[in-house]
Amino acid sequence: MIVHSTAIPDVVILEPQLFRDDRGYFFESFSQQEFNRLVRPINFVQDNESCSTRGVMRGLHYQRMPHTQSKLVRCTRGCVLDVAVDIRQGSPTFGQHVAVELSEDNHLQLFIPRGFAHGFAVLSEEAVFQYKCDNYYAPESDAGISLMDESLDIDWRMPITDAILSAKDQHHPVLADAPHDFIWGEELY
């Protein structure tokens, strides 16, 4: 596994080592030992999967304290634009984001630490999206930021006015008005 840094420290792109031959390919999609060594020690406790069609946008989701989550995400069918937004108060990258295309062809994964909001836009006809979480989902801690928040300056690679959003995602506040209790430099783990 190769770890690529991004413009925001702690958010990293993971690239697996593919072994190809005339039968197809093989790669190790996750190794706890390698992740702990190359990224950080972590204990993933829940795996999730969603299937969405072109134009669906999900996010920007996060869980508030004490149920905050880190996520390791990938797209196993199709293609998505995946986005992580820094929502740690006092962070030098507060309000900035990392956007990366994840697809069944590039096999990339994105690690999103606690203190970040996460979302994605489906760029293919259909996409199957998988993610590992290091904390269980807690509905009482569920929160989000509007995908349409212009202050975030995210190029979703599709017209936001054509996006297919859930009722919940249509009503998230902008970052300036969103509840978030993450303080940069404080231990979130």
Image: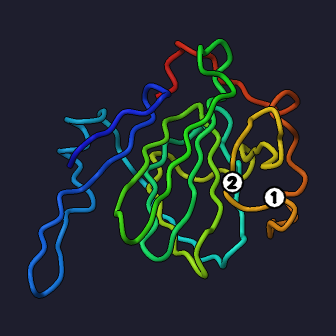
Query: Alpha-carbon neighbours of circle 1 within 10 Å: few (<14), some, or many (≥20)?
Result: some
Residue at the extreme left of the image, as rendered: 21
Of residues 79 and 64, which is closer to you in this image? 79
Q: Compared to 188, does 122 lie above or below?
A: below
* Residue 189: percent from left, percent from top: 46, 28
Q: Which residue is mark 2?
A: 156
Q: Residue at x 12, y 68 (%)?
A: 19
Of residues 18 and 158, which is closer to you in this image? 158
> Is there CB contact under 8 Å for labels 1 and 2?
yes
Q: Residue at x 52, y 12 (%)?
A: 185
Of residues 41 and 26, which is closer to you in this image? 26
Q: Compared to 78, does 114 lie above or below?
A: above
Residue at the extreme bottom of the image, as rendered: 23
* Residue 54: percent from left, percent from top: 67, 76
In the image, taking residue 58 as reference, residue 31 lies left or right, namely: left
- What kind of residue is marked 1? Ile
* Residue 42: percent from left, percent from top: 34, 39
* SS class, disc 1: helix
Q: CA distance from mark 1 to mark 2?
A: 7 Å
In the image, taking residue 31 as reference, residue 59 lies left or right, namely: right
Q: Which residue is mark 1?
A: 160
Q: Compared to 40, does 94 lie above or below?
A: above
Q: Residue at x 84, y 68 (%)?
A: 162
Of residues 62 and 20, which is closer to you in this image? 20
